[in-house]
Amino acid sequence: MTSVTVRVPAKVNLQLSVGPRRDDGYHDLVNVFHAVSLFDEVTASDEPAPREASGGPPVAVTVEGESSGQVPLDGSNLAVRAALALAVRAGRPPDVRLRIRKAIPVAGGMAGGSADAAATLVACDALWGLGAAQDDLMELAADLGSDVPFALVGGTAVGTGRGEKLSPAPVAGRFHWVFALAEGGLSTADVYAECDRLREATGEQVGWPRVADGLMEALARGDAKALGQMLDNDLQAAALLLCRPLARTLAAGREHGALGALVSGSGPTCAFLADSEDHATSLAASLEAAGVCRRALTAHGPVQGAEVVP
Ligand code: C5P
């Protein structure tokens, strides 16, 4: 049996500015992605599928770890779709077994499903000896989902279009984070729809999104205090309406000295910027003790995107 394991990070959005709804149902964005040290691992192997799986989908998948029971195992699994898409592109059978070990919260607004799809592209490319060009993998990734290309590259990057067109953002040093995991998840599509409804109800004029200069400067200087003040997410109001306890979680983080607090992507995970690793550890303990989250995890960023584990 041959196998390849790929490690892939979660993301938090430092700025998520949502423009008008497009004709294709998506929204044009300015989406500043930041990869953080919460990792899923995907192992692709050519071990034959068990007997009971024969006649089932050609890509067999198992999932372990953080909320793994909520991850679909059928053709709707984004990692399965990634393996199938790569096999079609390569003109080969998609025979592969995928084993996903999850640490990224499921449906948590940290792009865990997208991360697993990106990791699967890299793992299957190596397992099948394809040597696909990075541009080809990026194109397949964008077809799979708006956040999948970023999971391939990691670091910190500005996403435009629906989030799939990336340009790297220079960052000095390392930032320390706490992620407060909520009970259950939120559907990304539902949160965007709620954002549209809110805007319609309030008659808000939706302008063309643009990247905040102050955010880019804070990143380039490695200035956590300034970064904390610049964190901004247009989906936050919608996520708070769909998951009301999150307002208390955000308030508790601020009370315990977070430099900045926001809902991560479409939520419900809340992200808090700390001013040191020690501060992140104590902030996580305070959030758990306050009973405002299911669990609080510490992490740092930026980290690199999907990479083969030697
Ligand atoms: O691209 P992805 O499949 O991850 O998007 C999930 C859903 O999020 C889309 O179906 C859409 O409702 C919403 N979305 C959006 N605009 C974006 C990205 C996602 O409306 N730029």
Image (cartoon, grey):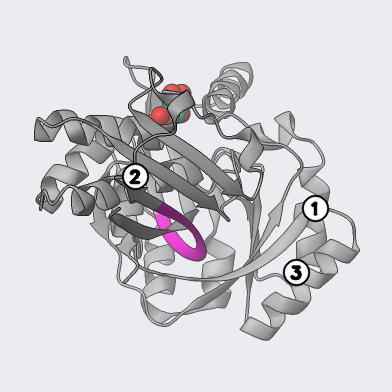
Q: Quadrant of residue 306?
A: bottom left
Is residue 209 among the parts visible in the rendering?
A: no
Crowd class of label 1 (few under 14; some 14 to 19; many from 20; radius 10 Å): many
The residue indicated by pointer 3 is 284
Position of residue 241 measured from the top left corner of the image (x, y, whole percent) = 73, 31
**Image quadrant where one finds the C terminus:** bottom left
In the displayed structure, would residue 123 be above or below residue 164? below
Helix, strand or loop under label 1: loop
- Quick one: which residue is furthest to the front in this view? 51
- As shown in the figure, which amino acid type bears the numbered disc 1? Cys
C-alpha span from label 3 to label 1 = 10 Å
Q: Is residue 292 above or below residue 265?
A: below
Instruction: Give the spatial CA distance, label 2 vs label 3.
Output: 40 Å
- Label 2 sits on residue: 47
Q: Is residue 211 above or below residue 308?
A: above
Point out the stretch of residues depicted in magenta.
33-42
Q: Which residue is mark 1?
A: 293
Among numbered discs 1 and 2, the one appearing first in the sequence: 2
Query: Could you tell me how far apart the alpha carbons at marks 1 and 2 are, in whole angstroms?
Result: 39 Å
